[in-house]
Image (spheres, rainbow, N blue to C red):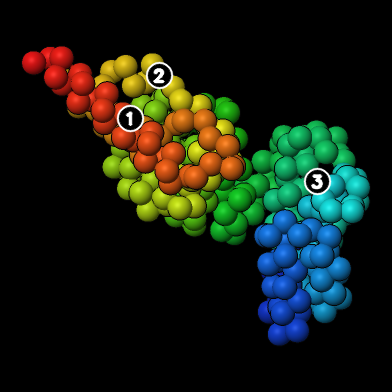
Amino acid sequence: MYKELIRNFSEYSPFSEKAKKYYKMASDLYDSKKYEEAFPLFLISLAEGHWLSLVTIGIYYSQGKGIIKQNYKIARSFYEKAAEKGCLGGLCNLGYFYENGFGVEKDENIAFELYEFSANKGYRIAIYNLATFYQKNDNIPKAVELYKKAVELGDTDGMDALTRLYLYRNIGEYEYVAKKCIKLNGSYLLNIMCKRNVNWIPELHSYWPSEDEEINKKILTILLISKYRLCSNYDYIRVLVYGITLNIIKFLMNMLQKK
């Protein structure tokens, strides 16, 4: 089935204005976590020929959103229909199902093929997923290349992965990582800190200050992504500033002690 989907894949034609209107209304509600209100609008946009709704409806069944109960087989059928209609998201999500064995027999080779096809078409999430495959197989240069492609398309997961590789695998991408951390401050920095519960790592700060320039660069990057555990009810900016300020105080105290 998946080979046929790839062989016959042809991207969808432009949608009608009416279809786009309903899809946008549904997406806005979905982004606001109003899943039950969004669902019927996705159905209307689908009836008007907005095939991307097939992917989102598949996600409803995949994750059990709103009043929809989780059902991987139904989700898979929507992803397959989306792929038939020319939606790369359908192919990519099918790849995720094969990678994890959701509603299908697990097969990482099929997953890789689906990701690779979608990635070659420029689909951001597939590029990120493909990068994780290369990282799992310890092909770090290829993983970094793909993560950077994903980041250039605005992928915050790719930025997270690059930062971790920089910190722990010495990939030598300081300038790129630091600049992207700053550029993606709103979408990446706060998202990573507040939604992913990234922990503070004391041992990485024990080297500050250091005569080793590379370590100093890493510390500066760590300061940018301030690894305090945060909760969603925190004042994000206040806690971020507090975390960075605390580290600056530590630095100054160390400098005074050296004198």
Q: Residue at x 42, y 43 (%)?
A: 238
Q: Tell whether 250 sits left or right of 28.
A: left
Q: Earlier in the sequence, mark 3 or mark 1?
A: 3
The alpha-carbon separation of the residues under discs 3 and 1 comes to 40 Å
Residue wearing tag 3: 63
Q: Mark 2: which amino acid?
A: Pro
Residue 252 percent coordinates (x, y): 19, 26
The dot on residue 246 is 1
Q: Mark 1: which amino acid?
A: Leu
Residue wearing tag 2: 202
Q: Earlier in the sequence, mark 1 or mark 2?
A: 2
Q: Earlier in the sequence, mark 2 or mark 3?
A: 3
Q: Residue at x 33, y 30 (%)?
A: 246
Mark 3 against mark 1, which lies toward the viewer? 1
| Vertical position of residue 86 compared to residue 66: above or below | below
Q: Mark 3: which amino acid?
A: Gln
